[in-house]
Amino acid sequence: MSAARPTKSVSRATPLTGQHAHEIQAFGSIVAMPLALASETRRESATNLNQVLADTITLRDLYKKHHWQVSGPTFYQLHLLFDKHFTEQNELVDLIGERIMLLGGVSVAMSADVAEVTLIPRPPKGREEVPVQISRLLNAHEIILNEARTMARQAAVDGDDGTNDLLVSNVIRTNELQVWFVAEHAVDGPLVRSDGSSGEDPSLDEK
Ligand SMILES: [Fe+2]
């Protein structure tokens, strides 16, 4: 006697796993979107935003690497700051990725693909000193700021005000602020005793 076949209502509730098919949109292509923007404008903006996206994903991950691997007397402060910046960069990642999609493009997403595109130099897998961590972060920020300003101007010329606004209000402003918070840690000031560089030690005058 054969086993009873599942009833129709049960088979419809069974998950259909292991399915495969061709992708529905190729990376680099643009589909039509009723945005009152020319397809060439949307294509150029999507291409530019994918570069900023790849670099922002890389900078975001660099912050998490440094959050984990930081060491030294400023460990706690930098441990917290690096994670705050990671979170803010992650918010930028979502804003940029979703704008590429709404323009009709395809967002770069997976780390192997990001690694092929990013302009930010790859750090070693191991731990580095705080000054080197900071230098890496500042260099990455400057790469993003440089390209974002160029792309923002291009978007404005093309009439893509939404992309211009995203780049200026979100990407540029966030990166500029983060540069300040990180760069001030690279000022070589005394921790406890003034170095007296402006004159002699006043305590010596009384002797
Ligand atoms: Fe953490």
Image (spheres, rainbow, N blue to C red):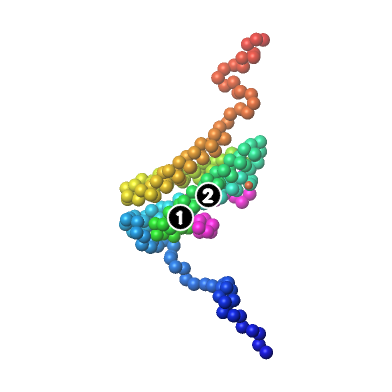
Residue 47 x %, y %: 41, 55
**What amino acid is labelled 1 in the image?**
Glu
- Residue 5 in magenta stretch: no
Secondary element type, mark 1: helix
Q: What span is in magenta?
A: 109-128
Residue 45 in view, yes or no:
yes
Write down the quadrant of residue 84 in the picture.
top right
User: How would you classify the magenta stretch by its main secondary structure?
Assistant: loop
What residue is disc 1 on? 98
Residue 33 x %, y %: 36, 60
- Residue 123 in magenta stretch: yes
Q: Name the N-terminal-most of marks 2 and 1.
A: 2
Classify residue 60 as left or right of residue 159: right
**What amino acid is labelled 2 in the image?**
Asn
Q: Is residue 63 above or below residue 2?
A: above
Front residue of 140/164: it is 164
Mark 2 crowd level (few <14, some 14–19, many ≥20, 10 Å Cα): some
Which mark, by number, is residue 85? Answer: none
- Which residue: 64% across, 84% down? 4
Instruction: Quadrant for the N terminus, please.
Output: bottom right
Which mark, by number, is residue 90? Answer: 2
- Measure how far apart labels 2 and 1 are at the Cα level: 12 Å
Q: Is mark 1 within 8 Å of ligand 1?
A: no
Residue 69 x %, y %: 64, 46
Q: Is residue 191 above or below residue 7?
A: above
